[in-house]
Image (spheres, grey):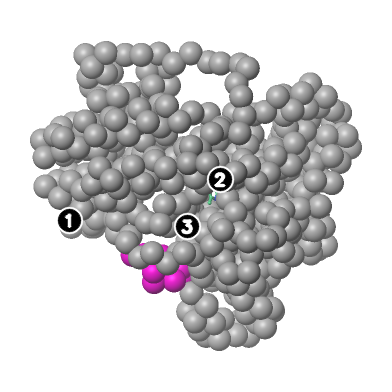
Amino acid sequence: MNFKTIIEPFRIKMVEPLRMTTPKDRKEILEKAHYNLFLIKAKDILIDLLTDSGTGAMSARQWAKMIEGDESYAGCESYYELEEVVKDLTGIKHIFPTHQGRASERILFQIVGGPETIIPNNTHFDTTRANIEYTKAEALDLVIEEGKDPQSDHPFKGNMDLVKLEKLFKENEGKNNIPLCLLTITNNSGGGQPVSLKNIKETKELCEKFKIPFFLDACRFAENAYFIKIREPGQSDRSVKEICQEIFSYADGFTFSAKKDAIVNIGGLLAVNNDELAGKIQNLEILTEGYPTYGGLAGRDLAAMAQGLREVVEEDYLEYRIKSTNYLGQKLLEIGIPLLTPIGGHAVYVDAKSYLSHIPPEQFPGQALACELYLEGGIRSVEIGSFMFGKNDDAGNFIASSMELLRLAIPRRVYTQSHIDFVIEVFERVHAKKDKIRGVKIVEEPPFLRHFSSKLALT
Ligand code: F0G
């Protein structure tokens, strides 16, 4: 539809109240949470943009499917429904449900990883990297150079650098130490940037030449396919579903967090074509996730996932999804907030380092901005910068993360345009006093993954 206004392609028949708080309440809440937004109770948040994972709103059809879910231990009907939908979309032979994406990663890399092995990717998501490194394998990021430049306007900044990938394959030829190559669509850690169909196909061809299986981290496959439709020459007349089918036709397998593009609150998939690998996955799955026809989920979760996968490739939905994320980004750019551009599919990333240039990286400008957005309007966002990834070397010197970002992730089908307009207004107010925003420092931190539980204070 060719209208200026982006309407939500759904209407609402069940609502959840949002609790308004006063500035005084929020100041107290933030102090009590030690300036760490993970430690704030969700009931004290007005607009929650912490993540798009598992936070989406299911449709009436998905809820109806929940009621129909078959809870048989083995061979439940809901599994076969899910299998049919996934096979239609992907053509992959063996489909294993898991409780979420990282469970698929754990099973896969426990089997194929291990010391001396290397797993290349455009950019590994944290849990993927952690599951690979846990087996003592190396997780290698080979995204194109434009993908590392916050302001490059390349339309597919998630693309794999094929020159570097070929070099890696050549250097390791005959060593049998690259069990598979991964490609993350869209590239979350690189700003939710898509990968082109051409790059997916060429990555597959390169893998085939060197006899290396090609896998997708398919969390946001439908958003990636929609970007291909609107940005890649020759793709605009195809349906998103057709594009998805072509994407998956190149893959020998995939990991998937259904909490993203299956619009469910929990669930994941691990899918492979290779029979021998499937046998090993089945054994591990039985050991740790559950019988392979339910894989750590209830039958109703499988049924809702199947329905979500039908809905996520609907183009009215995807047009609204991508345009509404872009709407938030464009308005923030108009205010003068520097962003990682082009704007990604599931989130808007603020370049907090250049925005709050008076706050040095060791005082976490992204976290300082996250705190200010909460104080001003009860918005929860997440810092992706030195608070999350920075460290100290053995001599105690601070090592900053390469970027200081603040992510505003948009849950699927949850917030309306007026919620987003409210977020924009909060940014306008914060912008007016941005030079007064103070940095923060860590006063207590756990031994790892410090962003989840550290205590902070104002500097
Ligand atoms: N891969 C990617 C690209 C992801 O974005 C995530 C999760 C996972 C794997 C792991 O999936 O959470 O179901 O175990 N990303 C969430 C986020 C947590 O906020 O971006 P999971």
The answer to whether residue 131 is left or right of residue 66 is left
In the displayed structure, 72 sits above or below 186; it is above
The one nearer the camera, 37 or 111, is 37
Instruction: Find numbered disc 1 in the image and state the secondary structure of the residue it sits on.
Output: loop
Q: Residue at x 35, y 54 (%)?
A: 340
Q: Which of 120/228 is in front?
A: 228
Q: Which contiguous range is marked in magenta? A: 141-149
Residue 289: say if magenta. no
Choose mark 1 or mark 2, whichever is in front.
2
Dot 3 or dot 1: first in sequence order is 3
Q: Which mark is residue 193?
A: 3
Crowding at label 1, few (<14), some or many (≥20) Cα neighbours within 10 Å? few
Disc 3 is placed on an element classified as loop
Contact (Cβ within 8 Å) of mark 3 with mark 1:
no
Q: Tell me whether the residue at label 1 lies in contact with that at label 2, contact meaning CB atoms closer than 8 angstroms.
A: no
Q: Is residue 248 left or right of residue 35?
A: right
Residue 133 visible? The answer is: no
The amino acid type, in three-letter code, at marker 1 is Asn
- Which residue matches tag 1? 397
Asked whether 143 falls inside the magenta stretch, the response is: yes
Tell me: residue 45, above or below residue 278. Answer: above
Report which residue position mark 2 lands on.
Answer: 2
Q: Nearer the viewer, mark 2 or mark 3?
A: 2
Q: At x 76% / y 53%, what residue is drawn? A: 89
Amino acid type of the residue tagged 2 in the rendering:
Asn
Task: Estimate the x, y position of residue 68 in percent, counting from the top left.
Answer: 83, 24
Please report whichever mark, 2 or 3, sits nearer to the chain's N-terminal start: 2
Which amino acid type is marked by label 3? Gln
Whole-percent x, y for residue 341 in the image: 37, 56
Which of pointers 3 and 1 indicates the residue nearer the eye? 3
Relative side of 144 to 23, left or right: right
